[in-house]
């Protein structure tokens, strides 16, 4: 499986909306109750700015999208969404490993927030992310390269 990324465009909006809804339906229903399509459409539209996203490609075909922000003191994984049919195949791990390598090189930690009921929390823990805070709805996590702090 060859993974790639490309900048999102406005023509990716429907793919991203469909992927978002498919990936989040279960977690949102578990955490908040019934799925509200109109509300989820609105939340997606508020966040979807194509210039800030990349489309994840699996063998040249779109399989998800992500947004990563570089800050002076950390790299923020703002959003990573993998279509359900592509989950569990190592795509997320490979994407995170690439960002972790970037973090090592930049001597910068990675940060993210994840919905409390999202099963991706287990992936993040396996990759070495630690809980560093909570909100009403999210768990805040950080990954720091231990070798940088070993002195």
Image (cartoon, helix red, strand yellow):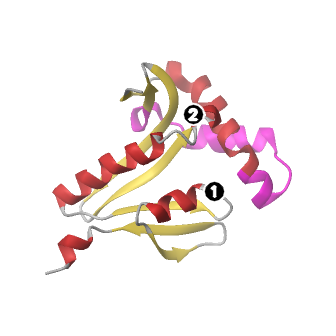
Tag 1, which secondary structure?
loop
Please state the horizontal and vertical placement of residue 1, each as a whole percent of the image.
42, 27
Please state the horizontal and vertical placement of residue 94, each as a whole percent of the image.
39, 43
The answer to whether residue 61 is left or right of residue 26 is: left
Instruction: Tell me if residue 106 comes above or below residue 50 in the rendering.
Output: below
Q: Give the range drawn in magenta.
A: 27-54
Q: From this viewpoint, which residue is outermost toward the right?
A: 34
Query: Main structural element of the magenta stretch: helix, strand or loop?
Result: helix
Please state the horizontal and vertical placement of residue 114, each as a whole percent of the image.
56, 60
* Residue name at image x 18 percent, y 71 percent: 148
Residue 59 position by quadrant: top left
Closest to the observer, 13 or 93 = 93
Closest to the observer, 55 or 121 = 121
Q: Residue 144 carries which label?
A: none
* Residue name at image x 69 percent, y 36 percent: 22
Residue 42 position by quadrant: top right
Instruction: Tell me if residue 62 comes above or below residue 69 in the rendering.
Output: above
**Disc 2 crowd, CA 10 A, few/some/many (<14, 14-19, 20+):** few
Closest to the observer, 52 or 103 = 103
The earlier-in-sequence mark between 1 and 2 is: 2
Q: Residue 86 carries which label?
A: 2
Tag 2, which secondary structure?
helix
Q: Does the magenta stretch include residue 41?
A: yes
Q: Does the magenta stretch include residue 81?
A: no
> Exactly how many numbered labels are in the figure?
2
* Residue name at image x 24 percent, y 61 percent: 72
**Disc 1 crowd, CA 10 A, few/some/many (<14, 14-19, 20+):** few
- Tell me the residue that label 1 is attached to: 119
The answer to whether residue 151 is left or right of residue 139 is: left
The answer to whether residue 119 is left or right of residue 36 is: left
């Amino acid at each position: 499986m060859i993974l790639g990324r490309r900048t999102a465009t406005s023509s990716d909006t429907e793919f991203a909306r469909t992927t978002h809804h498919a990936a989040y339906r279960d977690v949102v229903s578990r955490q908040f109750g019934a799925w509200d399509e109109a509300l989820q459409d609105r939340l997606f539209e508020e966040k979807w700015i194509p210039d800030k996203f990349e489309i994840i490609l699996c063998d040249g075909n779109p399989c998800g999208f992500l947004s990563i922000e570089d800050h002076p003191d950390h790299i923020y994984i703002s959003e990573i969404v993998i279509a359900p049919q592509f989950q569990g195949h190592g795509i997320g791990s490979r994407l995170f490993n690439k960002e972790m390598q970037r973090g090592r090189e930049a001597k910068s930690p990675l940060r993210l927030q994840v919905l409390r009921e999202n099963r991706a929390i287990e992936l993040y823990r396996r990759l070495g992310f630690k809980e560093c805070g909570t909100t009403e709805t999210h768990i805040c996590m950080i990954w720091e390269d231990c070798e940088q702090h070993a002195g």
